[in-house]
Image (cartoon, rainbow, N blue to C red):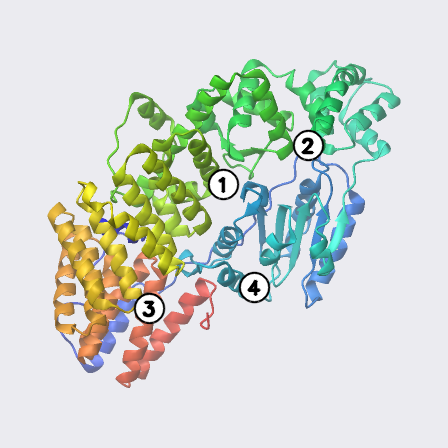
Amino acid sequence: MGGRDGEGEGHGGDGHNAVYGGTVHGGLIQARLIEAMNLYQAPPPPPPVPRQVPPPPRGFVNREEKLADLHALVDRARSDPAPPVVVVSGLGGVGKTALVCRWAWQVVDQFPDGQLYTDLAAVRRDGGVDVGGVLGGFLRALGVHESYVPASLADRTAMFRSVTAGRRLLVVVDNAQHAAEVRPLAAAGGMTVITSRTQLPGLVLDGAEDVAVEPLTQEAGTRLVRGWLSGPHGAETALAELVRMCGGLPLALRAVGARLVTSGQLSVDRVLAELADERQRLRRTAQAGGDPESAGVGPVFDAVYETFPPHTRWLYHLLGIHPGPTFTESLARAVGGARVADALGDLLAAHMATRVDEGGEWFRLHDLVRLHARECAETHESESVRTALLGRVVAYYRVAADAADRAAAGDRFRLALSVGDDEAALRAAAPTFAGRAEALEWLDTERTNLLPVLRAAAEHGWHDAVWRLCQSLWTLYHTRKHYGDWIESHHLGVEAAQWEGRVDAEVRMRNQLARAYYELKELDRAADELARAGELLGLVSDPRLPGVIWETDGLLRLAHGRPLEALDLFERAKEANEAAGDRHGVVVQSYNVGQALFHAGRYERARAVLSEARGIVEETDDDPMRSRIGIVLGRVHRAEGAVDEAMSALADAVTWAARLGQHTKWEEALDQLIGLAAEAHDERLAEFCREQRQALLRTVRVTADE
């Protein structure tokens, strides 16, 4: 119940307890401990080498000179003690990302430790970027288990530098706007390449190389377009004029070229006439203060848009309304799209949409295309239609996130919800998940959409959707530690619950917000949220809600070194769980009670409480709690001088933590065993545990010093 807010570990398969069953001594316990731990001592295999850079788009513009500039820097990356940083700058739509992706795929063998990629445009919020969230993703991709990823930006930056030092790694940072958001992402080994619409002078002053990508010359653009065409589509002068009207931007030329190729009989002169008709609108847009880059390609996109059939225009309008940067076919279908696959094919053929990753299910529009799609939606759809479509998008994410959360976290405590006919239909269209890992990965991939959707829902006053979506994001945030998103979303959730008059939801939101501050060690802010939640407990009827508040408050008291105050709160939370018949909640709070008793020096009572909780765990197969209880029980036995019992409890904790992939608990139990073995002068056991610990840390790419 209440304890489930803090329990993010997954469940493992069936197994048996190879240690408990009586006290053993001397060489016998040593042999049994090693035998038991050997059952699961092998750490999981290392993750595959990351290859995150997207494939270059079809119809890549020949940029041999710029490719040569980038190739020349690879040799420097091999030997330079200061790994090179390169800024590839140029106008939007000029082909910076395509250039870097093409180069990265050509030099993949030069960076054997992998390629990392992030698009900062996808995670930018009000002009700022959650750099800590990007670093967390990088660290996990490099093999650092999520339980080892630190909370603060400074600590994540330091770990990233440590993990990448001495490696041959390529980091590509797309769509940067400021030097400050890029510096923490530069690898300590290998090479870092950044794309930006400006030169990022701060990085250049730091020593970064600048590779400027200019619009295509008329000669180069004409040669490019001519290569796409077969037969007499127009004179050379007409092709040159087409390049000029497209501003020499490959993004615009590809869109026009796709139309010329697919139409068969359409001439360049006809396209030029259509573009000329848009010139006055272009001038008006620029004079009105519109985005000059968007205005520069707007006429081209208008001409392509006019060729789309109704179902493709509908999808294009939807993508202009969608608050997030990426989308899936399932979203479009759930919202009510017809012939979605055909419409998506039209956008891909026109180079208006691209795949986020090869063979994946997520797609995106170039940011200039998104601006145009938004303009088309505002021009061709009424405000009421746009609002209705946005409402369907919000409802889809609310339902899909709930399905993912349930697949990832099972029957954890959730506030009861009513399900209407509309929601039932959306649930039928939402994605399904094979298990926890797949569901969690979906949530993490959709993270760049979830916060923009929450914001849009809040702006439209859809408060019920806001707090419900926040409730479904707990497993993602608690597991993957996206603290920036976590805190902002739950501030929105608190406000939404207040607007709805849902006191129970406000208590829930404030508790989850307090957990974020607690993990960031901002204890005063966590206490403030809990105090506000505590003032509302008299107004809620669900007995589980006081339990979650008491648990979090107890953790804060324990962090402040006040175990007796924590003990009282944990015991109250345990009683609430017992009253609700939640045996898992009882186990979690018993574990917390045992910790508080241990820190208060009340070992005999701690042992009794923890032993009782262990019995419930064995009855209910609540496997993730086995390692936690074993570690605290081992500490209690050790404090009482019962070395053999402490070793048995800790060996059991090692076994279960290894089975379930609870890496930090695995390491913690091994550390305790190493200390016990040293006290018992058992060098063989101590050496065995040290070797296991080193193997574990090598697997998660963290050194023993870290």
Amino acid beneath label 4? Arg
Classify mark 1: helix, strand or loop: helix
Q: From what the image shows, is residue 44 above or below residue 599?
A: above
Amino acid beneath label 1? Thr
Q: CA distance from mark 2 to mark 4?
A: 38 Å
Query: In terms of sequence position, does the residue under pointer 1 or pointer 3 come before the other?
Result: 1
Amino acid beneath label 2? Asp
Q: Nearer the viewer, mark 4 or mark 1?
A: 1
Front residue (pair 348, 293): 293
Evaluate whether residue 338 shows in this view. Answer: no
Front residue (pair 152, 220): 152
Q: Are marks 2 and 3 in contact (CB under 8 Å)?
A: no
Q: CA distance from mark 2 to mark 3?
A: 55 Å
Query: In terms of sequence position, does the residue under pointer 2 or pointer 4 come before the other?
Result: 4
| Residue at image coords 39%, 28% | 395
Q: CA distance from mark 2 to mark 1?
A: 24 Å
Front residue (pair 458, 46): 458
Q: Position of residue 603 (x, y in %)?
A: 16, 73
Classify mark 4: helix, strand or loop: helix
Q: Position of residue 95 (x, y in %)?
A: 71, 38
Q: CA distance from mark 1 to mark 3?
A: 34 Å
Q: From what the image shows, is residue 80 above or below residue 109?
A: below
Q: Nearer the viewer, mark 1 or mark 3?
A: 1
Q: Residue 448: which numbered mark, if any?
A: 1
Q: CA distance from mark 4 to mark 1?
A: 25 Å
Q: Nearer the viewer, mark 2 or mark 1?
A: 2
Q: Residue 291: which numbered mark, if any?
A: 2
Quadrant hosting residue 309: top right
Q: Are marks 2 and 4 in contact (CB under 8 Å)?
A: no
Q: Which residue is mark 4?
A: 161
